[in-house]
Image (cartoon, helix red, strand yellow):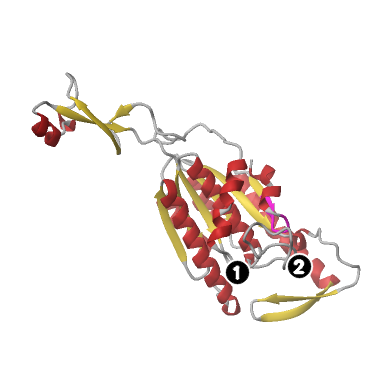
Amino acid sequence: MVNSELPLFADGININEKELLACQSIARALPEKRAKAKANLAGHRSSAIKGRGMEFAEVRHYQSGDDVRTIDWRVTARTGKAHTKLFVEERERPILILLDLSHSLYFGSSLLLQSVQAAHVATTLGWNAILHGDRLGAVIATEQEHIELKPRSRQQGILQLVSAIKKLHQQQLTSLAAQSTQTDHMLKACQRLRRLAKPGSLIWVVSDGTHFSPACLAMLSDLKRHCDMGAVLLTDPLREGTLNLPKHFQLPVKDGNHERIIDRHSYEHWLQSQQTIKLQFTDMMKKINVETRLINAGQRLNQQLGALR
């Protein structure tokens, strides 16, 4: 899969920290989108209004009408004059990414594995959140493991995401020959997400859509009532039927530890099943009024930024 069009530091199969950190430059090219908040603690920036909140701002002389509970007794004792603490009202918006790294994404016909492109998408969205001063968290799901990252601000938020993606992606690559038959791991991931998300959060779902069931729809619908949501569906030229193939061919493919040859007939049958998965996922998102954006693993992400707008 060596290709001169590969993103910086990437080989298309494995994931390293450098390529995920390089997604910051892609995030800077994304336009800033301001949406009406669904909760009074959601926003892109810290409020200029100083009052009781989570983040300490400064100490000043006590003034008539100040809440006596905010008096800084240490400074008061040291200076001999009453001082009070001021706080910055917390206005950072939690951004949560549900990243699907199921084995079905470890497939690629042209440039990247879909799992690698999914990692680039998730990291780019994460960088975008950090650049806007928001808090970043995630739920990363595989058949064997889920990693839950509570929203954190600044570099802590993005670095925990990069580290978790790198770890799980490598684990999935090494376990392709022993694929799990578990079918409800995305439902469990949605349940975790529902517990983690606070009202006013922005949630991104990044997946190939294969493992989303009607039970997942119920969880996402519940989240959508209190949060904003967007979906990114990963695909590939072979899954889209856009790869230039001869009329008659025999193509070797590998699924976990099973190797087989597909011809035109078996490919058309497989292609139909992939289009059904795509339609089912997009219809599911439509039911809860969520726009689905298509990202192809056959192109670099910076060539598809229009899909993320």
- On the question of residue 207 being in view, the answer is no
Magenta-drawn segment: 294-299
Above or below residue 204? Residue 72 is: above
Q: Is residue 295 magenta?
A: yes
- Disc assigned to residue 270: 2
Measured Cα–Cα span from mark 1 to mark 2:
17 Å
Residue 254 location, x and y as percent?
70, 76
In the picture of the structure, the residue carrying the numbered disc 1 is 103
Depth check, front residue: 211 or 246? 246
Q: Dot 2 lies on which element?
A: helix
- On the question of residue 306 being in view, the answer is yes
Q: Quadrant of the C terminus?
A: top right
In the image, taking residue 207 as reference, residue 197 lies left or right, namely left
Q: Dot 1 lies on which element?
A: helix
In the image, taking residue 278 as reference, residue 162 lies left or right, namely left
Q: Are marks 1 and 2 in contact (CB under 8 Å)?
A: no
The amino acid type found where label 1 is placed reads His
